[in-house]
Image: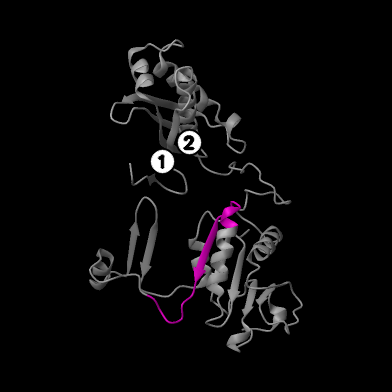
């Protein structure tokens, strides 16, 4: 079983990159994970003079890997086949290919009348065409350049018809479903999330002094956050029940910001991550702070709930830069 692959074929200047960009945005908005492979017959260079990777390459390195918490790039001093490029892309639902015009993959052909170049191949070799030439009669679905939403719908239907390896977020009817993680190996995973509740001076002082009528705000919110984390699948419809190793939830007062700061760390040894458990813990604690204090202040603001860090899993580690 393979990840679905669809190519886009056109002569230079037609606008296939613009069409692909729009389709990628539309598919991504629907929860589809998109990978892209582009073949540039004119060559390219992502190593810039003065950069470490450029210096390593100039020193004679045959391959350089650059990685950060957000992205990874591999620079090799050789060309690569489409098959190898496709195999290097992991954890996506579909791969869109620009170029590799001789590869045996389903293709969408594009033609713009003003260029006078026509299509790159006979029309019956495409699964669909995009053109502004009204004289074109195609034996396959036809779209105008501005009809990228309809083109994205067509691609979604084609995805469900193709052999699939990892397109598990949707069922045969295109409806969302819980991902099957049965074949994945358990790994150690952690996630740290944070958030805050912004309050006024009166509320802040009452929390600090323990003067709220409902009791100790920080202690009750801490317990509520831990309980919320354990019930994450009850809050988030597609979330798997995760055997948590532990939840560490911290709350403290920030005098300068007039806020209740919240940070949750979730850990497990499982087949899927614990980001949602950490975020749910923070959310539950923040809501409880609001509930404990709303008799005094109703315009409190729950703000900046975010993932700070995560480790483990196929997608690798992540660390938020602005915290």
Magenta residue span: 27-44
Q: Which residue is mark 2?
A: 274
- Decide which of 60, 157 is in the foreground and name it: 157
Q: Is residue 146 left or right of residue 204?
A: right
Q: Secondary structure at mark 1?
A: strand
Q: Position of residue 91 (x, y in %)?
A: 52, 53
Colour scheme employed for the rendering of this structure:
one colour
Magenta residue check for 128: no
Give the side of residue 15 with respect to residue 253, left or right.
right
Q: Are marks 1 and 2 in contact (CB under 8 Å)?
A: yes
Residue 31 counted in the magenta span? yes
- Figure check: 20 above or below 246: below
In the image: residue 161, left or right of residue 103: right
Residue linked to disc 1: 310
Helix, strand or loop status at disc 2: loop
Q: Which mark is residue 248?
A: none
User: Residue 170 location, x and y as percent?
Assistant: 66, 49
- Quarter of the C terminus within the rendering: top left
């Amino acid at each position: 079983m393979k990840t679905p692959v669809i190519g886009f074929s056109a002569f230079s200047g037609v606008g296939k990159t613009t069409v692909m960009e729009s389709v990628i945005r539309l598919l991504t908005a629907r929860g589809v994970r998109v990978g892209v492979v582009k073949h540039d017959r004119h060559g390219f260079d992502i190593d810039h003079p003065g950069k470490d990777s450029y210096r390593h390459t100039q020193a004679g390195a045959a391959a350089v890997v650059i990685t950060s918490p957000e992205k990874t790039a591999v620079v090799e001093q050789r060309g690569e086949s489409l098959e190898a490029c496709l195999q290097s892309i992991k954890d996506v639902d579909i791969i869109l290919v620009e170029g590799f015009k001789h590869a045996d993959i389903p293709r969408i052909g594009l033609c713009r009348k003003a260029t006078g170049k026509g299509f790159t191949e006979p029309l019956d070799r495409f699964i669909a065409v995009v053109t502004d030439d009204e004289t074109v009669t195609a034996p396959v679905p036809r779209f105008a350049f501005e009809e990228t939403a309809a083109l994205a719908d067509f691609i979604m239907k084609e995805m469900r018809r193709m052999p699939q390896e990892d397109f598990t977020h949707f069922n045969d009817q295109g409806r969302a479903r819980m991902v099957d993680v049965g074949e994945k190996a358990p790994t150690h995973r952690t996630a740290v999330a944070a958030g805050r509740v912004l309050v006024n001076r009166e509320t802040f002082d009452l929390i600090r002094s323990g003067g709220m009528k409902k009791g100790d705000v920080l202690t009750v919110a801490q317990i509520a956050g831990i309980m919320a984390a354990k019930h994450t699948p009850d809050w988030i419809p597609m979330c798997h029940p995760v055997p948590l190793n532990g939840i560490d939830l911290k709350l403290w007062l920030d005098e300068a910001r007039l806020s209740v700061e919240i940070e949750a760390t979730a850990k497990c040894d499982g087949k899927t991550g614990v980001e949602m458990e950490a975020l749910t813990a923070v959310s539950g604690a923040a809501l409880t702070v609001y509930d404990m204090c709303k008799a005094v202040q109703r315009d409190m603001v729950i703000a900046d709930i975010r993932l700070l860090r995560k480790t483990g899993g196929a997608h690798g580690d992540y660390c938020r830069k602005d915290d």
